[in-house]
Each structure stands twice: as structure tokens, then as C-alpha cells.
Amino acid sequence: MYKIAAIGDRDSIYGFASLGVGIFPVDDSQQAVKTLRRISESGYAVIFITEALASQLQAELERYKDEPLPAIIPIPGVNGNTGIGMKQVSAFVERAVGSDIVK
């Protein structure tokens, strides 16, 4: 059975624990890379990652871009929305449909 995880700063992901999502708080990008690699190999199908952290890990996230699992989804953190999540959704839609219909 697949699992769902959230990775980012503690304040941004703590609420996911009440939904049964595995939470993985990280303090820096090096720790985040190690954690992301570990949980992606541990049966997690969906990994939510804060947008602030995703912006620091672009090269690492590229490794998973064309893989079917895990789906790595940027989410806003407590500091607000940076727009990275919507850009990614638009790119996926454009790739699937052939044009950007999300605008």
C-alpha cells in the first residue's frame, strides 16, 4: 500500500500528521535531499514539499520529474505562496494537453 508524506519546515507540515500523512521536518537543504531520497525509496507515492524547500532543491527534484512515483507536489508554507506549485501544475497540464489551459 502506498503512503503519503510531507517534507518541509515543521510549522508548515505539522498539520498533515492529523490526516495520517507522514511528516518529515527538515532544517536545511542537505538534510532535505537525504530525507527526500530515503522516503522516495520507502513506498511513498505522494510527497508534498513546501515551495520554499522545493525552490532550493530544483536539481534534486528533476531526478523524479519523469518517474511515475513518487509524485512530488509543491505546497505553500507558512510564509505564503511563491507560485512554484501553480507553475508546476501548468507545466504538467501543458505537457498532457498540448497547451496551457490553467491560466
Image: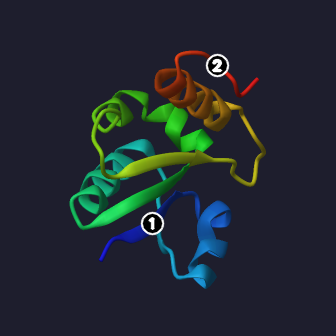
Image vertical order of residue 25 relative to residue 90, above or below: below
Q: Residue at x 34, y 29 (%)?
A: 62
Circle 1 residue: 5
Under mark 2, the amino acid is: Asp
What colour scheme does the image use? rainbow
Q: Residue at x 48, y 27 (%)?
A: 96
Residue count near mark 2 (Cα–Cα under 10 Å), binned few <14, some 14–19, many ≥20: some
Q: Residue at x 60, y 73 (%)?
A: 16
Circle 2 residue: 100
Q: Is residue 103 left or right of residue 96?
A: right
Say which of 55 and 4 sits in front: 4
Could you tell which of marks 1 and 2 lies nearer the N-terminus? 1
Image vertical order of residue 33 relative to residue 42, above or below: above
Under mark 1, the amino acid is: Ala
Q: Secondary structure at mark 2?
A: loop
Rendered image quadrant of residue 40: bottom left
Residue most extreme to the left: 41
Q: Is residue 24 left or right of residue 86?
A: left
Say which of 66 and 26 sits in front: 66
Say which of 68 and 84 sits in front: 68
Q: Is residue 65 left or right of residue 7?
A: left
Q: Marks 1/2: CA distance?
A: 28 Å
Q: Residue 26, how many percent across, how many down?
A: 47, 58
Image vertical order of residue 89 relative to residue 76, above or below: above
Q: Residue at x 35, y 33 (%)?
A: 65
Task: State the quadrant of the C terminus.
Answer: top right
Q: Secondary structure at mark 1?
A: strand
Does the residue at mark 1 contact the one at mark 2 (Cβ under 8 Å)? no
Q: Residue 67, how many percent across, how many down?
A: 27, 40
Task: State the quadrant of the N terminus.
Answer: bottom left
Q: Residue 82, how many percent across, how many down?
A: 72, 34
